[in-house]
Image (tube, rainbow, N blue to C red):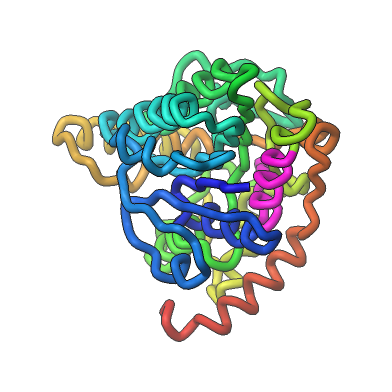
Amino acid sequence: MNVLVTGGGGFLGQAIVRRLLGRGEVVRVLNRSHYPELAALGVDCRAGDLADAEAVRSACRGCDAVVHVGARAGPGLYWPDFERANVAGTRNVLAACRAEGVGVLVHTSSPSVVHAGGDIAGGDESLPYALHFPAPYPATKAEAERRVLAADGAGLRTVALRPHLIWGPGDNHLLPRLIERNRAGRLRLPAPDKKIDTVYIDNAAEAHVLALDNLADSAGAAGKPYFVTNGEPLPVAAIMRSLLEAAGETPRIRQVSPRLAHAAAAVVETAWRGLRLKSDPPVSRFLVEHLSTAHWFDIGAAERDLGYRPAVSIAEGLRRLAAAWRREGGARR
């Protein structure tokens, strides 16, 4: 197949690209920046913004399938940035698929679209979308997912995957921020014993390839969302401690009362919105809600419909992460 991966230069995007190349697919990526390491692998690299409809349509031209990973993520509060990337960008991808005759679309969504502020323990795809969201990211991802699933039909088969907290070698988002907060003594948890799910990078990438194959073949997964995790929920403090130790750090995790954390988030958000700051705030209601609640999911549907099996366990993933971090540690410190 000729496959376009939007956001193909990112952490998840690159893992998907390499998996597709490894089995002989012709791969194109659309990113705002240039990635020479992908070009060196023979990837057709296109520069463009998801909000640019013509750039997206041009990137889709001649492709059989699209894996739509590109998005604006994070706890930021500036709505226009998230609307532009996540809603307008997804709308442009859907329009380009229709205009260029692309028959398959795998969309990367997020479990946060169903997080309504309380505990989720073993939740499955029957969970409804949250009615209210504390931040632009989950709100715009929910809107994007709705559009993708509603677009499923005879001419375009679609599916939405909800990977949860992706980590592993090459992570340039979660672990670096965790290390930064730990070193600054700002790693405080309101509910360290609440269980959460994560997913190792190779498992997340494999789920996307399996979804691609399903839509190109039987299309039994068409029009559906799927949670994608390692299936190994652990207390949030245990996960953070393990990731930090794999990176050679001494964890400095402290507990803070949930009430104090929520109050601090409210104060910070008021200031950020008042000043119309576009940067990510140091604390937010979105972040506090996710650190104060359990959120782990039943991956039975992905196992049944997609044939998904998390081949790399958390224990093995941590060994691989530690080895990679030792190899690259000098440049990271």
Above or below 31: residue 196: above
Any part of residue 291 in sight: no
Relative depth, front residue between 202 and 251: 202
In the orientation shown, which residue stands out farthest toward the left? 275
Report x, y in % for residue 317: 70, 64
Q: How far across and how far down the image is residue 259, in percent?
A: 45, 33
Q: Is residue 40 above or below residue 67?
A: below
Q: Looking at the image, can residue 190 be seen? A: yes
Residue placed furthest toward the front: 62
Identified at 63% across, 70% down, the residue is 321
**Residue 130, picture quadrant:** top right
Name the residue at 55% across, 18% down. Answer: 151
- Quadrant containing the C terminus is bottom left
Question: Is residue 210 shown in magenta?
Answer: yes
In the figure, is residue 293 to the left or right of 256? right
Q: Residue at x 73, y 44 (%)?
A: 210
Instruction: Describe residue 216's horizontal placement relative to residue 151 as left or right.
Output: right
> Residue 218: horizontal and vertical position, in percent?
79, 30
Question: Which image quarter: residue 266?
Answer: top left
Which residue is at the front of the view, 261 or 279? 279
Observer-nearest of 197 and 20:
20
Mark count: 0
- Residue shown at 68% from the left, 47% from the top: 209
Q: Is residue 212 a member of the stretch shown in magenta?
A: yes
Front residue of 151/316: it is: 151
Magenta residues, dominant SS class = helix
The span shown in magenta is 194-213
